[in-house]
Image (cartoon, rainbow, N blue to C red):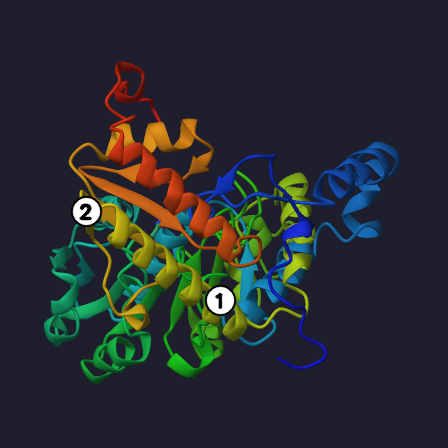
Amino acid sequence: MNATTRTLPVKERFHLPKGVIYLDGNSLGPLPRGTTERVQQMMEQEWGDHLITGWNRDGWMEQPARVGNRVARLIGAPAGSVTMGDTLSVKVYQALSAALKLRPARRVILSDSGNFPSDLYMAQGLIRQLGQGYTLRVVAPEEVAGAMDDTVAVAMITQVDYRTGRMHDMTAITRAAHAAGAIMLWDLAHSAGAVPVDLAGSSCEFAVGCTYKYLNGGPGAPAFIYAREDVAAEMQPALAGWLGHDAPFAFEPEYRPAPGIARMRVGTPPVIQMTALEQALTVWDGVDMQDVRAASIRLSELFIKEVEANCPQLRLASPRDPAMRGSQVSFAFDDGYAAMQALIAHGVIGDFRAPDIMRFGFTPLYLDEEDVRQAARILTRILTDRLWDAPEFRTRHQVT
Ligand SMILES: *Cc1c(COP(=O)(O)O)cnc(C)c1O
């Protein structure tokens, strides 16, 4: 760690409720301090006082590119290659449709069964829209590289599995896609801010991801999209909105794409939410993703060791080798839903994914070893004393 690197963790930079150990930053990151003040200032001074002049005066129009550059640094992408907006599902649709256009003679979208359902749904919806014999081929995660052939137009793969934390080898799979002549689209939803990513080095064509998980942008924070420079220059946006036009304020009747990644903008950016994200991303200033990764592995290995030593009821559902995991650890337990509800009631927040997965995210910016030990102690007590076995913990809520 050199002198310019901030020492991990930077816990004091987050608002964390007293008495809570937060192991769910993989699903919704906590509120970074300073965000409330910055958003209030934006609303009062920029929106309130500057009104419509804020688009120029306060840089609202360039904000998607500016914030994109902050995200780019964290995912190994060059400046100017990332833009922000919409939700991840929309960005998946945009990248996928642009990718298919680049391989017009091919008809298969390849994905895997560990992908997040929304990515698969977006592919299914796009295929129905396109007709023309397009199909979605979904294989087991370990079969992805072997399933590349000359029918595959695009491989759409999420690097880190949202349920188990299993992590794909980005370099190897991208290489296999390219060897088969396919376009590579990575979903980095559980990678950005969690593990070091080298997008430029991987030479994949497209990547997308969200910013409300490890990047702490807040619920509904805008998503990001990346395209390799040569691809960005030729891709055709399916959602040809005016802010992805080369000259939005010329109000021309015909669409002409903006240069590069800016054509993946669609409509007016959500300035309030984007301001919260822009401020939230300042906690990463001076933070090296390699340091985050090393700390994340330390914390997750400690958690696995403590839980396996004290909770024989649970079975590790994540890869045992930390190099094969993202920044989360999952345990399978038949009564996992109730156990997670009990755990939350005792101040340790993780989450549950059907059918039986208890999920714990490790976010070294605001978690330390004592948090992890304490979380394991509380989990042990809940299981040993069967504190989960109560009606109030079995009632299913809408969000699990
Ligand atoms: C979280 C997540 C999503 C969510 O998409 P939104 O449109 O932002 O709700 C999509 N895909 C993956 C892989 C995810 O992990």
Depicted 37 relative to depicted 363: above or below: above
The residue to which callout 1 is attached is: 295
Which amino acid is tagged 2? Pro
Determine whether label 1 and label 2 are within 8 Å by CB.
Answer: no
- Front residue of 206/158: it is 158
- Indicate left or right for 34 with 361 as reference: right
Is residue 187 visible to us here? no
Q: In which quarter of the image is residue 65?
A: bottom right
Residue 40, position as x, y percentages in the image: 78, 35
Quadrant assignment, res 125? top left
* Residue 114 position within the rendered picture, expressed as x and y whole percent measured from the top left: 21, 54
The residue carrying pointer 1 sits among few (fewer than 14), some (14 to 19) or many (20 or more) residues within 10 Å by Cα, namely many
Please identify the quadrant where the N terminus is shown. Answer: bottom right
**Which of pointers 1 and 2 lies earlier in the amino acid sequence?**
1
Q: Which of the pair 252/355 is nearer the observer?
A: 355
What residue appears at the point 67 percent right and 74 percent down from the top-left corner? 5
Q: Picture quarter containing residue 148?
A: bottom left
According to the image, label 2 marks what residue? 312
Q: Under tag 2, what secondary structure?
A: loop
Residue type at mark 1 is: Ala
- Real-space Cα distance between discs 1 and 2? 26 Å
> Does ligand 1 reach within 8 Å of label 2's beta carbon?
no
Q: How many marks?
A: 2
Please name the residue shown 56% across and 49% down the image. 216
Tag in front: 1 or 2: 2
Question: Is 210 on the left-hand or right-hand side of 181?
Answer: right
Coordinates of residue 342 in the picture (x, y in percent): 34, 28
Q: In this view, does 239 lie above or below 302?
A: above
